[in-house]
Image: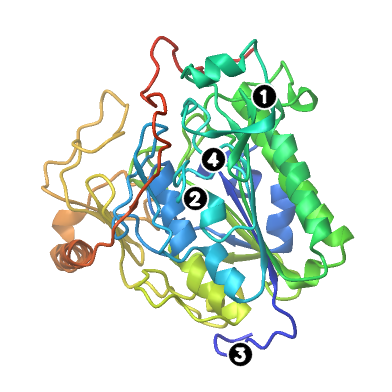
Amino acid sequence: MHCGAVALANQPNVIVIFVDDMGYGDVGFNGATVPKTPSLDQMAADGMKFTDFYVGCAVCSGSRTALMTGCHYQRLSMAAVLFPNSDRGLHPDEVTLADMFKTAGYRTACVGKWHLGHLPPCLPTYQGFDSYYGIPYSNDMWIDPANQLSDDIVLRNGVTLADLKAGSKIKNEVPLFRNEHVIEYPCDQTTITRRYTEEAIRFINENDDAPFFLYLPHTMVHLPLAVSPAFDNPDNDLITNAIQEVDWSVGEILKSVKQAGIAENTLVVFTSDNGAAVGSSLPLRAKKGSVYDGGIREPTLMWWPGKIPAGSVCSEVAASIDLMPTFARLSGVDLPARRIDGKDIWSLMSGAVDAKSPHDAYVLMHGPGTVRSGKWKFYPWQEGKGRQNRDNAKWQPSTDPVQLYDTVADIGETTNVAAQYPEVVKRLQHAYDTHVAEIKANQRPSAEMVRPEGSPSPARPGGVKKKTAKKK
């Protein structure tokens, strides 16, 4: 199927599974032997693996902004990470994937971690989603006392309504939402992957007669890690168990699509929001938080029986910002009037002959910045100054003022070749500078979240250390 030849009898259902903190080397289809990921490996065998797929940020909220809007998060004045004491979130005037699908008559649901604003007007139900079920931010955070409580809220761990109304909050104890209300506090995180999966399958089964968009951003495998009893194998590290439960979840979602008889009209995208925090981003350099490839190049699969070639691999540069224009094309809707940054990648996904990346240069401003162009990865800063450099005590950083790596010959970005390719450096430095200037000249505002008058402070609680991923 060629780039200009999409003629679909029916608008496809679209499911986006967005895992938290899963690294490039955490999955069997990228070579991992531990953990075991049979569902994902089968999805790769039945679909397309993207080897060079990038997200828009090396941490949570910036990455989700890029996915949801097709825009770099800096364009929308979004923070890289929001907290329960943040006062701004994604502006409801921005067009999200859910907004776009709604204009095409789709039913929409968000099940999982939102992290683009936990109060009106930034919650999912203000951003195009018919329904929301999940934890509104990272699971190592705390509750904002301004959140609305459901009349039938389930309280756990000895918490009382009086505690919540007085502003009680504890780190790592987070709320579970249904639409705009807290229905459980603190959320039982050992059951969260299973409950997200059940909620997602319920939505699929209730909407198998009309086009739908399901966004499933898993809370796992972000710290603090937790698994259900069925995956609590004491012989494994907790990160292994958590990844294997997410893999199970993916298998259940695909099974439900097949059982509903809608597989041939359903596109499923699987990727992660950033590199590994606990697991593995190997063979890439660095992990979460870094703009080296280990922080922003993600394990990615596309699955659509009969439309995406089974067992195929795409090694062209593509990105999460590209999903919006691609989905717009497939669902037959116009792109937002406001400028976005993504490009249509259907020619890559459909396996069109000689299809190439639409990005001459994919530029990220996150942290100290980076550019990916073809095989080249460029950093407009000196090695040794960025986050998460090499741990090897014998390693000596390059003294060149910038960095350039050949990602094909040197996937681990070990040897800076900037001095050998001055013309490439010049071209990519220009691409970076041009991108930064354009974004700064055309930024759009985020939204101020509305706090009910008299709400207790959402300030960060103290005294509780983040839980780790030690073996039980």
Residue 64 seen in the figure: yes
- Please identify the quarter of the rendering in which residue 444 is found: bottom left
Label 3: which secondary element? loop
Q: Do the residues labelled 4 and 2 touch (CB within 8 Å)?
A: yes
Which class describes the residues within 10 Å of circle 2: few (<14), some (14-19), or many (20+)? many
Q: State the residue in front, 6 or 122.
A: 122
Work out how far the residue at label 1 is from the one at label 4, CA to CA, in angstroms: 21 Å
Q: What residue type is labelled 1?
A: Asp
Q: State the residue in front, 6 or 2.
A: 6
In the image, is residue 145 above or below residue 374?
above
Q: State the residue in front, 436 or 208.
A: 208
Q: Which amino acid does label 2 sit on?
A: Glu
Which residue was labeled with disc 1?
188
Work out how far the residue at label 3 is from the one at label 4, CA to CA, in angstroms: 35 Å
Task: Judge left or right: residue 202 versus residue 402.
Answer: right
Task: Judge left or right: residue 85 versus residue 127.
Answer: left
Which residue was labeled with disc 3?
5
Q: Do the residues labelled 1 and 4 touch (CB within 8 Å)?
A: no
Residue 71 location, x and y as percent? 38, 63
Q: State the residue in front, 21 or 117.
A: 117
Which class describes the residues within 10 Å of circle 4: few (<14), some (14-19), or many (20+)? many
Work out how far the residue at label 3 is from the one at label 1, CA to CA, in angstroms: 47 Å
Which residue was labeled with disc 4?
22
Task: Judge left or right: residue 309 versus residue 447.
Answer: right
In the image, which disc is placed on residue 298? 2
Work out how far the residue at label 1 is from the one at label 2, CA to CA, in angstroms: 28 Å
